[in-house]
């Protein structure tokens, strides 16, 4: 009997927080803009048309606007948990849905994209399987997700401060996978020709409070189910700021690391390049490399 995945994230709270800051993204959406541009440029290298495309978690509008402007994308479906977040996207088919329970028919889509939203899914392996099943044969999935090195400075400061003050650490920053783990997830979900790579983005701020302020307006606050419900104490906050400033500042500004991991994978199709079965090679390695045996002692 299979058990349900743990409810790591409060997705209702996530939606509410994203809706609360929908009009305050200007100036703090640089990561969304950067990742959207990168995904758009990567699509330029794929020489094919996508008659039906879906942008999951489209409420940030950054990627949807770029997809809508592409000549190789036909019908664009913008999908998100929140109708409020989709209201700015006009002239597109809108769909209110949760990434954990996709409503698409099997083999009905040519392209599925996602911009910095899938990391808040409780059952990510299940969501990836649903995406793959919704894609037509040889359909493409592309996404950007935060990687495990994101906010390592803030994590470190909180951990040290809490250890000092309360003798333990409470969940404050969402767990994030690394490149290898995302590659395994794509393969597990049945995608072929998976590609996973990362981009480290280093940003500086006047002080840690400025960073925390921007994270809140990014809708990136703590939505862990096991989060502490009581407000952050002044003592703990003061010590976090102190540690951050001491350990991660340079020339009067603090450093913050963001890692963006890019994923792509294809729905299986017979035309795709297949790896050879072990032992089936018809040519020796030496022949393939253009090498030849060393001459015998009596050869000239």
Image: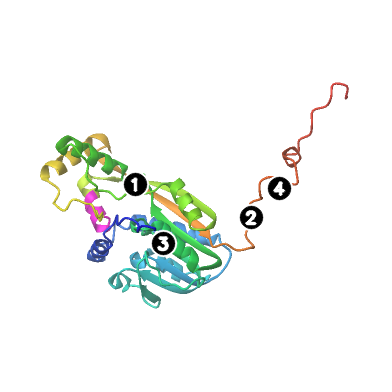
Residue displayed at 60% across by 63% down: 269
Name above or below for residue 55 compared with residue 264: below
Q: Is mark 1 on a helix, strand or loop?
A: loop
Name above or below for residue 243 compared with residue 183: above
The residue nearer to you, when weighing 291 against 131, is 131
Residue position for label 1: 150
Which is nearer the N-term, disc 4 or disc 1? Answer: 1
Which is nearer the N-term, disc 2 or disc 3? Answer: 3
Q: Give the range drawn in magenta.
A: 212-220
Pointer 4 local density, CA inside 10 Å: few below 14, some 14–19, many at least 20: few
Image coords of residue 55 (percent x, y): 42, 67
The residue nearer to you, when weighing 193 against 152, is 193
Residue position for label 3: 127
Q: What element carries label 3?
A: helix
Alpha-carbon distance for marks 2 and 3?
25 Å
Alpha-carbon distance for marks 4 and 1?
43 Å
Residue position for label 4: 280
Alpha-carbon distance for marks 1 and 3?
22 Å
Which image quarter: residue 223? bottom left
Name above or below for residue 135 compared with residue 290: below
Residue position for label 2: 274
């Amino acid at each position: 009997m299979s058990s349900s995945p743990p409810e790591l994230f409060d997705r209702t709270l996530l939606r509410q927080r994203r809706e609360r800051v929908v009009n305050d993204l200007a100036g703090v959406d640089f990561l969304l803009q950067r990742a959207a541009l990168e995904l758009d440029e990567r699509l330029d290298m794929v020489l094919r048309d996508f008659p039906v495309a879906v942008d999951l978690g489209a409420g940030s509008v950054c990627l949807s606007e770029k997809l809508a402007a592409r000549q190789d994308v036909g019908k664009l479906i913008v999908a998100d948990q929140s109708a409020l977040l989709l209201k700015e996207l006009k002239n597109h088919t809108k769909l209110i849905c949760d990434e954990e329970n996709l409503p698409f028919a099997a083999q009905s889509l040519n392209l599925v994209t996602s911009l910095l939203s899938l990391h808040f899914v409780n059952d990510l392996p299940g969501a990836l399987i649903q995406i793959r099943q919704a894609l037509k044969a040889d359909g493409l999935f592309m996404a950007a997700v935060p990687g495990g090195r994101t906010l390592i400075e803030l994590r470190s400061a909180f951990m040290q401060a809490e250890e000092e003050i309360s003798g333990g650490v409470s969940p404050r920053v969402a767990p994030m996978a690394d490149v290898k783990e995302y590659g395994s997830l794509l393969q597990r979900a049945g995608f072929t020709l998976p590609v996973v790579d990362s981009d480290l983005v280093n940003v500086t701020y006047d002080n840690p409070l400025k960073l925390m302020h921007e994270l809140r307006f990014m809708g990136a606050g703590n939505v862990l189910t096991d989060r502490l419900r009581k407000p952050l104490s002044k003592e703990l906050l003061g010590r976090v700021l102190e540690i951050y400033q001491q350990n991660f500042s340079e020339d009067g500004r603090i450093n913050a690391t963001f890692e963006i991991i890019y994923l792509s994978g294809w729905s299986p199709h017979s035309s795709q390049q297949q790896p050879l079965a072990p032992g089936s090679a018809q040519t020796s390695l030496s022949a393939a490399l253009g090498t030849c045996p060393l001459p015998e002692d009596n050869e000239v």
